[in-house]
């Protein structure tokens, strides 16, 4: 305990004090004989009577309330509320108003609000709630009188005490407390708890911190937040009467007193209560709530708060002033007693300069935090460090094993040896957990600061993250990887720490986030072959290389090499996986790398790029065709040596299919490297792309002897070249004297004229072969009956074409005649355009020699107006 208040006796006289009110340094006494007396109490000038009204009432003054801002005194006497003016001393409580509607009032409570209007004007709103028998009746003060609010509440019993705060009126009955919410259209009742768990006691209610209710129950003071009873869903009742259950209704733990409260006032930050045989001063914070006991005031019957730090107490005929001891003196005592929370609360309300007050509060938070840390209350200590806005590095230095070791040859003289006790085992883990929570908050603050100031200094953030890394390794190493991905840890210190704890996988993340990709890939290569390592194998390396992207292409090629050598199939996914980074790699450079180092993977890589990624790059298509061709040639060579080559058929099928279906390769470039003594069927496909139909048909007929493919080719290209069937017939009727390519023999069926095949094609495709062009190539001794079928079809086709042409000519002549007649009819139309004619669009007259347009409906517009309309229509 310490001395928070000093007691000064004001007067001892024969008046019978029945009620008391105070404001500032003034105290007003209401006597049993109906007198009103005001005293002014000053520490220097002493006590001075300022007003005295001997005959204010014939009945006792049972209750008084002062509105200092309006110089009003509300007095309850003879069961009626009266109002006095205390502005002028000489008036001696000048009577202003007596409210007849309050007749029968046994007690009242007031709510004073000072709202600010939209114009900035501040007005005082005074509302009064009177207990009249078993009813609450509400009034408001306006134009120097009490006016009815037209609001009343019926009660179940006669109230013993009232307290009004905002939207809520708390009523204390003989046996219970009730809160009424008056914010809605109709008052809503909420039961609180009984006044006592055992015997009947008088209720006691006080306003705490301006907006909370301090309610007495047994020997407890329960702090209740009235906002939780504001009408929302209409269900906020609490009837549990046990002290432990009272916490559910309060924002603070119930405060225990030495005996039940008889009266209570709030003087920030103290609750001053009248108990049996003493007045107690208690704080709402800390474990030991008792601040001071004042036994010399055991006879008091009344307590009233006058101003900050000033309370008046009265007995039947005595009056005391209770003044708060100067805050610096109290603070010194509290710090010696290590009551830091109370010292902070007192400093917050002191009259010291704001800057000094803030600095003092910060220092107290620091002292409190260190005391908590010493007592191993680590979580609470970190919260105090946070409130003190201390440099996080100073907190980290409380843990010597977390402070980075100085480099060889240097000494860090700025790091003092921690005065805190050594921590081990469970205490150390709890300390680490509390530090983690603190550093997480500090990190967030530093990130915001860097973003707002756009500062380039990241040293403190590095220290915080590096310390967090060490803490995570001691408590929860699953959080290490997410922290490292934030990329703020100090590289060298973190690297050393991770190696010490053998966190190789996390070390890879550190290297990756710091851009040390080569170090990471070297470590991955080393760990890949170590039995039991978390990085054993190739998967982590493959994934790492896939995520590097185009900016690190040389590095990808360097470290992809060993993966491709060990497992070409897995290694190829470095360049073919379905990732954005992989797909964006320059494919020409990847191709060059594979051709130079891993030629066997060129075909699968190009197949993936062309088939899966639909790449239409001509170079890639040309290269893939070249790879197919070379491989087929090698397989054919092996086959000629008598080896089994099961790959030949599917590989040649791939080559044929790509030559036939791909539209992206360059036929002339592919043809340059294509052999002339083999793969002639594939060569025919390339020549077909170049529109060299005679060469293609020569291969099909003269070399391969495949009439079906030759005919199919002619049918496929007939629309492009109507003479292609003539070329086909000529290939059959005019055999070459030598093969089209060296070392390629002619097919025996077509080394001589094959008249049978030629006649079959003539008869089948007669309508596509002009007899005037083909007859000169037919043998002179060919019997005409063999041409009967061909000639019949051909002549019928010619006649049909002629008839169609004649019909089209007749139709065209008829259409031309119709158009000429229609044009002539339009030319015969005449109209008059004179000086009174106006444009139907702009409504202006036509000037001399104006250009105009006449629409079919007869409307005439300027040429410029017509053009404007046409442009507008085109834009739509």
Image (cartoon, grey):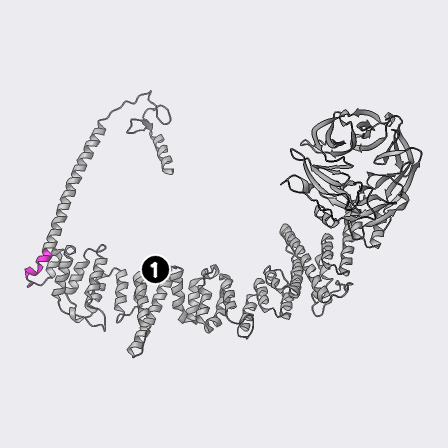
Reading the image, the residue beneath label 1 is 664
Locate residue 54 relative to residue 355 in the image: left or right: right
Residue appearing at x 36%, y 37% in the figure? 874
Foreground residue among 204 and 446 = 204
Image coordinates of residue 148 in percent, x first then y, are: 72, 27
Foreground residue among 776 and 27 = 27
Magenta part of the chain:
781-791
Query: What is the number of callouts on the image?
Result: 1
Foreground residue among 487 and 140 = 140
Residue appearing at x 68%, y 41% in the figure? 229
Image coordinates of residue 787 in percent, x first then y, are: 9, 59
Image coordinates of residue 394 in percent, x first then y, are: 73, 59
Residue appearing at x 71%, y 70% in the figure? 409
- Secondary structure at numbered mark 1: loop
Locate residue 389 relative to residue 483 in the image: left or right: right
Query: Farthest residue in the front direction?
Result: 199
Q: Quadrant of residue 140?
A: top right
Residue 649 visible, this orientation:
yes
In the displayed structure, 665 sits above or below 746; it is: above
Locate residue 291 relative to residue 663 in the image: left or right: right
Image coordinates of residue 188 in percent, x first then y, are: 67, 37
Residue 124 visible, this orientation:
no
Magenta span: predominant SS is helix
Q: Quadrant of the C terminus?
A: top left
In the displayed structure, 751 sits above or below 6; it is: below
Magenta-drawn stretch contains 787: yes
Disc 1 residue crowd, few under 14, some 14–19, many 20+, Cα 10 Å: some
């Amino acid at each position: 305990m310490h001395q928070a208040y000093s007691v000064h006796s004001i007067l001892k006289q024969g008046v019978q004090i029945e009620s008391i009110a105070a404001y500032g340094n003034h105290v007003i006494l209401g006597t049993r004989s109906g007198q009103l007396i005001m005293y002014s109490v000053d520490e220097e000038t002493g006590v001075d009577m300022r007003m005295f009204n001997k005959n204010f009432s014939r009945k006792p003054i049972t209750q008084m309330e002062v509105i200092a801002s309006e110089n009003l005194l509300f007095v309850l006497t003879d069961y009626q509320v009266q109002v006095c003016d205390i502005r002028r001393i000489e008036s001696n409580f000048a009577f202003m108003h007596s409210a007849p509607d309050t007749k029968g009032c046994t007690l009242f409570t007031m709510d004073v609000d000072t709202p600010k209007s939209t114009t900035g004007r501040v007005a005082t709103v005074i509302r009064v709630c009177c207990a009249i028998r078993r009813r609450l009746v509400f009034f408001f003060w306006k134009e120097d009188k009490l006016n009815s609010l037209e609001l009343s509440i019926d009660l179940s019993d006669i109230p013993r005490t009232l307290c009004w705060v905002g939207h809520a009126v708390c009523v204390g009955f003989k046996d219970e407390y009730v809160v009424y919410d008056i914010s809605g259209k109709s008052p809503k009742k909420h039961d609180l708890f009984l006044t006592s768990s055992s015997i009947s006691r008088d209720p006691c209610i006080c306003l705490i911190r301006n907006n909370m209710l301090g309610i007495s129950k047994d020997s407890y003071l329960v702090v209740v937040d009235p906002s939780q009873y504001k009408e929302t869903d209409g269900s906020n009742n609490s009837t549990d009467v046990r002290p432990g259950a009272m916490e559910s209704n309060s924002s603070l733990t119930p405060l225990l007193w030495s005996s039940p409260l008889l009266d209570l006032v709030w003087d920030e930050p103290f609750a001053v209560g009248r108990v049996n045989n003493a007045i107690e001063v208690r704080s709402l914070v800390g474990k030991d709530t008792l601040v001071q006991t004042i036994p010399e005031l055991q006879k008091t019957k009344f307590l009233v708060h006058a101003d900050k730090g000033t309370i008046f107490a009265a007995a039947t005929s005595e009056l005391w002033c209770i003044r708060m001891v100067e805050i610096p003196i109290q603070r010194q005592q509290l710090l010696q007693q290590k009551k830091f929370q109370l010292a902070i609360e007192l400093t917050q309300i002191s009259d010291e300069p704001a800057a000094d007050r803030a600095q003092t509060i910060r220092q107290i938070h620091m002292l409190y935090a260190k005391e908590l840390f010493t007592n191993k209350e680590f979580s609470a200590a970190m919260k105090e460090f946070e409130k003190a806005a201390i440099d996080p590095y100073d907190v980290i230095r409380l843990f010597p094993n977390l402070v980075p070791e100085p480099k060889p040859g240097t000494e860090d003289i700025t790091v003092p040896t921690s005065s805190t006790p050594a921590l081990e085992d469970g205490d150390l883990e709890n300390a680490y957990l509390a530090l983690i929570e603190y550093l997480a908050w500090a990190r967030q603050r530093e990130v915001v600061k860097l973003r707002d100031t756009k500062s380039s200094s990241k040293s403190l953030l590095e220290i915080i993250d590096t310390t967090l890394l060490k803490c995570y390794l001691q408590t929860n190493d699953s959080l290490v990887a997410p922290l490292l991905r934030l990329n703020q840890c100090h590289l060298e210190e973190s690297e050393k720490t991770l190696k010490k704890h053998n966190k190789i996988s996390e070390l890879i993340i550190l290297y990756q986030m710091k851009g040390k990709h080569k170090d990471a890939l070297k470590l991955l290569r080393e760990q890949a072959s170590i039995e039991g390592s978390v990085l054993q194998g190739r998967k982590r390396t493959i994934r790492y290389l896939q995520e590097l992207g185009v900016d690190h292409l040389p590095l990808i090629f360097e470290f992809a090499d060993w993966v491709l050598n060990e497992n070409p199939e897995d290694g190829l996914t470095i360049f073919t996986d379905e990732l954005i980074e992989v797909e964006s790699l320059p494919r020409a450079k990847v191709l060059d790398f594979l051709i130079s180092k891993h030629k066997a993977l060129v075909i699968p890589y190009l197949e993936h790029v062309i088939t899966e990624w639909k790449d239409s790059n001509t170079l890639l298509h040309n290269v893939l065709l070249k790879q197919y061709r070379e491989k087929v040639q090698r397989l054919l060579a092996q086959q000629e040596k008598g080896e089994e080559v099961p790959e030949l058929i599917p590989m040649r099928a791939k080559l044929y299919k790509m030559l036939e279906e791909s539209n992206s390769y360059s036929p002339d470039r592919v043809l340059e490297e294509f052999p002339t003594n083999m793969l002639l069927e594939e060569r025919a496909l390339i020549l077909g792309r170049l529109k060299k139909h005679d060469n293609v048909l020569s291969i099909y007929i003269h070399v391969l002897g495949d009439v079906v493919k030759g005919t199919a080719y002619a049918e496929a290209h007939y629309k492009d070249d109507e003479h292609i069937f003539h070329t086909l017939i000529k290939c059959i009727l005019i055999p070459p004297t030598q093969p089209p390519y060296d070392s390629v023999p002619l097919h025996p069926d077509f080394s001589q004229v094959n008249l049978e095949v030629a006649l079959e094609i003539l008869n089948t495709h007669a309508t596509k072969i002009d007899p005037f062009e083909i007859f000169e190539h037919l043998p002179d001794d060919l019997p005409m009956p063999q041409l009967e079928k061909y000639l019949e079809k051909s002549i019928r086709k010619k006649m049909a074409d002629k008839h169609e042409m004649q019909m089209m000519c007749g139709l065209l002549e008829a259409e031309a005649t119709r158009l000429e007649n229609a044009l002539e009819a339009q030319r015969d139309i005449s109209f008059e355009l004179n000086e009174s004619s106006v444009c139907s669009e702009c409504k202006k007259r036509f000037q001399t020699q104006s250009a105009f347009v006449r629409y079919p409906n007869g409307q005439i517009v300027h040429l410029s107006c017509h053009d404007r309309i046409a442009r507008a229509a085109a834009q739509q």
